[in-house]
Image (spheres, helix red, strand yellow):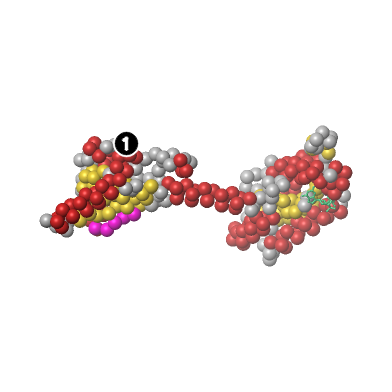
Amino acid sequence: MISNAEDMMELHWLFDMLQHIDVGLVVLDENYEIKLWNSFMENHSGVSSSIAKERSLFDVFPTINKPWLERKLDNVIALRTPIFVSWEQRPHLFPFKSYRPITSMADNMYQNVALRPISHVDGTVKHVCLVVYDVTDVAINKASLSSANDKLDQLSKIDPLTQLHNRGSLDKILKNTFNTFQVSQKPCSLVMCDIDFFKKINDQYGHPVGDSVLRKVSRLIASNVRSSDFVSRYGGEEFVILLPNIDVDGASFFCEAVRKKIAATKIILPNQAGEVSVTMSFGVSQLSPSDKSVSEWLNRSDAALYQAKDNGRNQYVAVR
Ligand SMILES: Nc1nc2c(ncn2[C@@H]2O[C@H](COP(=O)(O)OP(=O)(O)OP(=O)(O)O)[C@@H](O)[C@H]2O)c(=O)[nH]1
């Protein structure tokens, strides 16, 4: 008798704890009717246990993907094995609001859900228990970590002064372009360009003014390319522009257009220091099947740029 009373007490305690545990507990029968609905489910859904019980889960939550969940529940019963649905596959099963102040960045509660078969005393399985875990904190932390990583990744590819791609990302894209060219053989041109007598700007107006000229020239170049082109700061006042699907004649046309625009632009200096104009010299060459490496191609455009400087600057030289 004592043992029976103790058992009853234990059962009562267990039931009380399950009712108030900070995890959602739902028991469904084979027809998806709710047989148990603990206080976590009541608090987050606003649906009391007395209202939820004996109703189909899909009537209480019409937005749940019925065919998908039915398939899962049927499998749990037929195979007698649990199934786990992670928030990464499906952010939530139950459309609950997120209520934690620390996770206010999320409107909805992210959930991991375990679907477990429940055996009857005779060994048959006709019920499934859904265990719903609130994993909003984990999801939000992961999302902010991945957004911070994306930002860092982005920063590592960008030149901070000009906001153009930096040398590292240029090296990567040139390598990829070179490898793709071995198969596609589609024309691709590379322009190296450099501001003429830039040292004079620094000497005359100071380094900060030189910086603002670099920024302006970068914006001018970037606003004159197609979205598939790649503009990078190679170093100092030197830039490299990659023009996919453009042969050396098309690239020459592009250089001439940009050259004219830059030469015609008056750059307003900061702090009412007046205005300056700059010119640029350009060297251009096309990737050739005989190139054994990216450097051979780069060196050709570089040599053309120095030729343009030697010829008097403010011009392009193309290697054909
Ligand atoms: N303001 C500023 N100047 C830079 C930066 N990087 C390089 N420079 C300057 O760019 C100038 C480049 O000078 P040079 O290589 O002699 O070239 P240049 O005066 O443009 O002459 P040419 O190229 O022969 O026409 C140097 O004075 C560098 O200090 C930068 O980030 N900001």
Ligand 1 near label 1 (Cβ, under 8 Å)?
Answer: no
Label 1 belongs to which residue? 46
* Boundaries of the magenta span: 80-84
Tell me the chief SS of the magenta region: loop
- Residue 163 location in percent, x, y? 68, 46
Where's residue 251, x and y in %?
72, 49
The residue under label 1 is which amino acid type? Gly
Left or right placement of residue 184 versus residue 274 in this view: left
Which residue does the image show at 83% across and 52% down from the upper left? 308
- Quadrant placement of the N terminus: bottom left
Left or right placement of residue 101 versus residue 229 in this view: left
Name the element at disc 1. loop
Residue positioned most to the left: 1
Q: Does the stretch in magenta take in 77?
A: no
Residue beneath the point at 56% across and 49% down: 148
In the image, farthest residue toward the front:
2
Closest to the observer: 201 or 4? Answer: 4
Classify the position of the C terminus by image quarter.
bottom right
Q: Is residue 183 above or below residue 47?
A: below
Residue 82 forms part of the magenta stretch = yes
Camera-nearest residue between 287 and 210? 210
Work out whether residue 94 can be spotted. Answer: yes
| Residue 293 placement (x, y as % from top left) | 68, 64
| Count of numbered labels shown in the rendering | 1
**At 75% from the left edge and 46% from the top edge, which residue is drawn?**
255
Q: Position of residue 129 (x, y in %)?
A: 26, 50
The residue closer to the viewer here, 90 or 294, is: 90
